[in-house]
Amino acid sequence: LNTIVYAQKAADISTLSEKTLHTILEKNRAYYTQGKVADYIPELGKMDAKAIAFSVVDKNGKVFNTGDVNKKFTMQSISKIISLMVAVNEKGEAHIFDKMGYFGSDKPFNHFSNLETTGKPLNPMMNAGAILTTSLIPGDGEKPFLKILDMVRYITKNSSIDYNKSVYESEKSTGHRNRGMFYIMKNSGLISGNEDQLDNYFKQCSIELTAEDLAKIGYFFANQCVRFDGDATYKNADMAKLVESQMLTAGMYEFSGEYSRTVGLPSKSGVGGGITVSVPGKIGIGVFSPALDQHG
Ligand code: GLN
């Protein structure tokens, strides 16, 4: 938390340097001992708990990196902000949010929340809403996933990004809760397709990238969907506001309220150990540390 608050100040005084980042990282290095690598997806259990990386894209799109910056990890739930953007781009906000809420949450990411009562997921950040969001992206088979992957490649300007097949297989063969949510929503008519749509969700979670890529994603939503190099193909202030509002109210699941109070920046976590942070109108931050707290 100190790391991010410090970075927010740095964004104001624009004296960012790799040395500053390195100092912050070293101060925070020992915190991994307070966490645990996710192992409910067996492949994730193989992550190095001690790995740590920290990346910032400043207001001018300049990249600062420190730590294990070349280490790749899966973006997991961070992919949910990308799928939300793709779905809203194609179908419009009204269509997507007719089927789910804008609610914050006091429940873990994989909670069934009110699927049984009102039928609708609370928001597109928890698994249920994210699985539904991906199912609403037009296209057969793998196509919706490829649209998400293309958007990640565009935002990061990194065409080598792909998904990790072993993590995908691992999620697919053990994601019974997610499969349960998928079929409850199919039963209530919210989802109309077949299990390819659930596979697309597992694939998007398995997209592999680095802390630098996450910082570029943070920058993109912090700056009205303009890319770090100034490319404005997707410039859309309202889209950025929608995504940032979801990050702020539900991006850290049941910890979102406390996180808003202490850090106060739109952020999205993933159980692969990444967090993307947007400092609105300013910078993007990407952090990587796979040892998670109890909120994932
Ligand atoms: N793929 C993970 C899951 O569905 C994503 C969860 C997360 O990152 N919080 O369980």
Image (cartoon, rainbow, N blue to C red):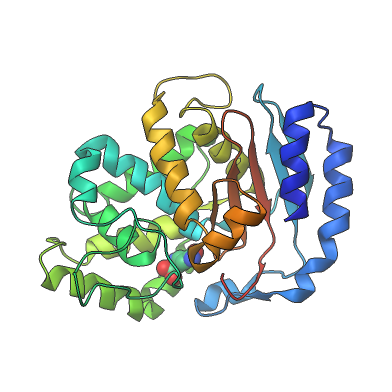
| Residue 139 percent coordinates (x, y) | 19, 46
Label count reads: 0
* Residue at 74% across, 52% down: 53
Can residue 163 be seen in this snapshot?
A: no
Q: Is residue 40 left or right of residue 241?
A: right
Q: Nearer the viewer, residue 269 or 79?
A: 269
* Residue 217, placed above or below residue 189: above
Q: Nearer the viewer, residue 19 or 250?
A: 250
* Residue 225, placed above or below residue 259: above
Q: Is residue 26 left or right of residue 235?
A: right
Q: Is residue 22 left or right of residue 227?
A: right
Give the quadrant of residue 283: top right
| Residue 269 percent coordinates (x, y) | 55, 58
Q: Is residue 54 left or right of residue 208?
A: right
Give the quadrant of residue 194: bottom left
Q: Quadrant of the C terminus?
A: bottom right
Can residue 232 be seen in this snapshot?
A: yes
| Residue 232 percent coordinates (x, y) | 45, 19
